[in-house]
Image (cartoon, rainbow, N blue to C red):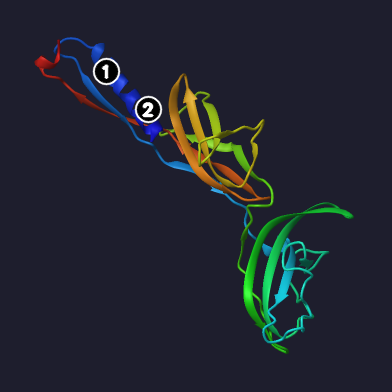
Amino acid sequence: MKRVVLLSVSILILALCLLACSSGPEATKLSVSFSDGSRSIVALNEEFDAGNYYWKYAAKKLLKETEGLTSGQTSSYDEEGAEFIHEDEPGLEGKVDGFSEGNWDFLLFGYRRSGEEGNYTYSLVYSGERKAVSLVKDAENMVTVAIGPVTDHGKGIIFVDSENITFAPKEESAVGDLDKSIVVARFSDGQQVQSEDDTYEVEPGVYVVGVKFTLNGYIFAQGSVVVNVYSNQTVTVAGEVNELVTSADLDTPDQTDVE
């Protein structure tokens, strides 16, 4: 809202200056307004593919009816006690054996792996839970777990692809070198985030990325996009911003309007 008010004040000052510089009954009065143009800056979160992640599960037997029969239960029902489904390869293909019949709760964790063999690092990206799943001998026992990105396992990244953030003029013509400025700020309080390049490492949360194209103090295009940042994931900002255009209503004032 503050940006809109400031823009309106600038337009009013411009109109007053035009009137002050005119004289005589033939003076022309201008009414000037700006339209926002089309803001097509976009934020692209990473596409999800289960085959790109390494998965762990934790399982807990519900013991109301089968107390003591806990085959398949992990050492604890949390991330610390979780076990790999496939430690040597990503994906969820295949089955996990050894569960006794009964009702089970499951936790699922998806990791991105980095580093070299013998010194791998696993960064949690997704997690989810499914409760009270009935497992029966000689059945398919398909366990479907709804997962989502995590926000409590470290920072995420906003990558502003500045080379692919472009200015789109209203008319195809030669355009001078415009100054492009980019601001990344927290949505909650407007606190700006600083970075020496196009990569912003931030705490998970909601942010606003603003882009502005200027020349000699005039704003020719501007746009913004709201981005959601999750732990150990990268969101990429790119796109183009249309030129801000003006409209002018020309009118010949009455004699009484001219001093």
Q: Residues within 10 Å of mark 1 (few under 14, many from 20)?
A: few
Q: Quadrant of residue 50?
A: bottom right
- Which numbered disc, 1 or 2, marks the residue closer to the eye? 2
Say what amino acid the circle numbered 1 marks: Leu
Determine which residue is flagged by label 1: 16
Determine which residue is flagged by label 2: 6
| Quadrant into which the N terminus falls | top left
> Could you say which disc has been placed on residue 149 in the image?
none
Q: Tell whether 16 sits left or right of 147.
A: left
Position in image of residue 77 (x %, y %)? 72, 68
Q: Tell whether 114 sits left or right of 187.
A: right
Q: Residue at x 60, y 68 (%)?
A: 146
Q: Secondary structure at mark 2?
A: helix
Residue 206 visible? The answer is yes
| Quadrant into which the C terminus falls | top left
Say what amino acid the circle numbered 2 marks: Leu
Position in image of residue 153 (x %, y %)? 69, 52
